[in-house]
Image (cartoon, rainbow, N blue to C red):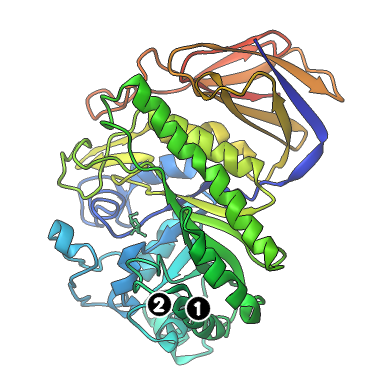
Amino acid sequence: MKKVYLVYPETKGTIAPEIYGHFSEHIGGVFYDGLWVGRDSDIPNIRGFRKELVEKLRALHPPVLRWPGGCFAETYDWRDGIGENRPVRRNWWTPMDGRYETNAVGTHEFLDLCELIGAQPYFAANLTGVTPMHIRDWMDYCLSPRGSTTLALEREKNGRAEPWDIPFWGVGNENWGGGGMMRPEHYADECRRFATLMSNVSGRVELYACGSNGADYSWTHGVVPQLAPVKGFIKGFAMHYYCGHAGDPVAFTNEEWDQQLRQASRMEEIITHNWNIICGHGMQESCRLVVDEWGCWHPDGSGPSKGYNLFEQQSTMRDAMVSALTLNIFNNHCDKVRMANAAQLVNNLHCCFLAAGEKCITTPTYHVFDLYKEHQGAQAFNVAVTDNEVFESSVTVSASVKDGKKLLTVGNLSCTEEAVLQLCAVGEELPETAVLRLLANDDLHAHNTFENPEAVRPVELTVDPRQPLHIPAGGIAALRF
Ligand code: AHR
């Protein structure tokens, strides 16, 4: 039996709600057939957005939604997505999936979606294909007060009189790769040029520089020190880490279960290493970490569209465990992590939803976000687990307190052994009862399908937290008291 010491009230800091963010790119089936069905569709919708999905997403309290890419952002012209008669364009992904962008969803529609689900928007600016003035115009269009500028008047003509609040803007995306294949020193100069104009706007904006590709710290070393002149504007370093795949997305072996989780657990080192470089350059007060793409990346073809939607994948209990582990890592590093965005929201990569036609289901990852949602804005505190050295028999934990209620989230990383945990509160008595929400399945390959949409779903129990807590192999528990 492992002992889990809950060490409060000393907190590690506030868990930024934005750590529980999502990402919605114009790629594959994320928007078209996923989020967006169109205003004239027979599928129930709210101003074109799939109603069922909007309602289920809203229930997660999504704090932030990133858009429009990803790599898509690098060929995006915001003017294509406003007003009447929108052009159809090739987009970044057209060579890979043969689809063209209709621009049915543009700035107004996306921001309407954010209002429907209660999320703050996070825009990724195109730094590769347009000028800084082009992006500054987009910001002018969105953020300038009613009636103030010609672009604000154009916005009003298009149906929105008041400015939106768009607090987060990315200065490019993956500029070490699809975003121009830049060298770090070249990106740093571009970032300074764009950031200077992108901060010349109405309203509060946090700008995020393009961060490292996972553990490629040469990018961090090259870019971070060069950001000093714009540190008044650049508030984050937005890195990406996908933990790839291990075997088949559904029919994986026990060894591949472990391998996938080992890959996911590298997030810890990547956060710490990047953070040390930021601190080494004295940028820690102004530039926190943003992980604006993370998740598993399995081979295509396991999702319901069987490969029609680019990067669509099924999601099992293993993906749920990657989510549980990753979100615990973010919580435990809440002093460093400003925001994170799971990639992506619907029908793509590490998604919360699969949707097509009239069908819309949630994935096991959706349930993890639901189990963890009370961590948003809470104070994280220390949890220490004894006998947790061996990866195969270890658990992942994080804990927080908000409005007097504590939330302990635990994932049993072993795919074969039950975890038995004895909670020990340091500085306080444990109460007699707690609410336990448990996401577990006898078959860790279990996943939700259109035919069986609730194969994986949590159960809720009232338990005595002073008694040993039994978490089945591969199970994820959220204990609230
Ligand atoms: O999420 C899919 C793609 O992965 C994004 O467009 C890009 O930023 C990353 O390489």
Crowd tier of the residue under label 1, counting other residues whose Cα lies within 10 Å: few below 14, some 14–19, many 20 or above: many
Mark 1 and ligand 1: say if the CB distance to the nearest ligand atom is below 8 Å: no
The residues tagged by marks 1 and 2 sit, at their Cα atoms, a distance apart of 8 Å
Q: Is residue 310 left or right of residue 326?
A: left
From the image, which quarter does the C terminus lie in? top right
Tell me which amino acid carries mark 1: Cys
SS at circle 2: loop
Tell me which amino acid carries mark 2: Leu
Outermost residue toward the right in this view: 427
Up the image or down, 217 lies above or below 450; here it is below
Task: Tell me residue 385's x, y (percent).
Answer: 68, 23
Q: Measuring 15% from the left and 39% from the top, which residue is drawn there?
A: 306
Outermost residue toward the bottom in this view: 150
Q: Which residue is mark 2?
A: 127
Outermost residue toward the left in this view: 98
Place residue 94 in its image quadrant: bottom left
Taking the image as drawn, is residue 338 in sight?
A: no
From the image, which quarter does the N terminus lie in? top right
Q: Is residue 130 left or right of residue 168?
A: left
Taking the image as drawn, is residue 459 in sight?
A: yes
Assess whether mark 2 and mark 1 are in contact (beta carbons under 8 angstroms).
Answer: yes
Up the image or down, 207 lies above or below 316; here it is below
Task: Tell me residue 5's x, y (percent).
Answer: 75, 23
Place residue 91 in its image quadrant: bottom left
Which mark, residue 191?
A: 1
Q: Earlier in the sequence, mark 1 or mark 2?
A: 2
Q: Measuring 75% from the left and 26% from the top, which residue is drawn there?
A: 6
- Of the pair 72 and 453, the residue shown nearer to us: 72
Task: Tell me residue 13's x, y (percent).
Answer: 74, 47
Crowd tier of the residue under label 2, counting other residues whose Cα lies within 10 Å: few below 14, some 14–19, many 20 or above: many
Q: Measuring 50% from the left and 90% from the top, which residue is drawn there?
A: 149
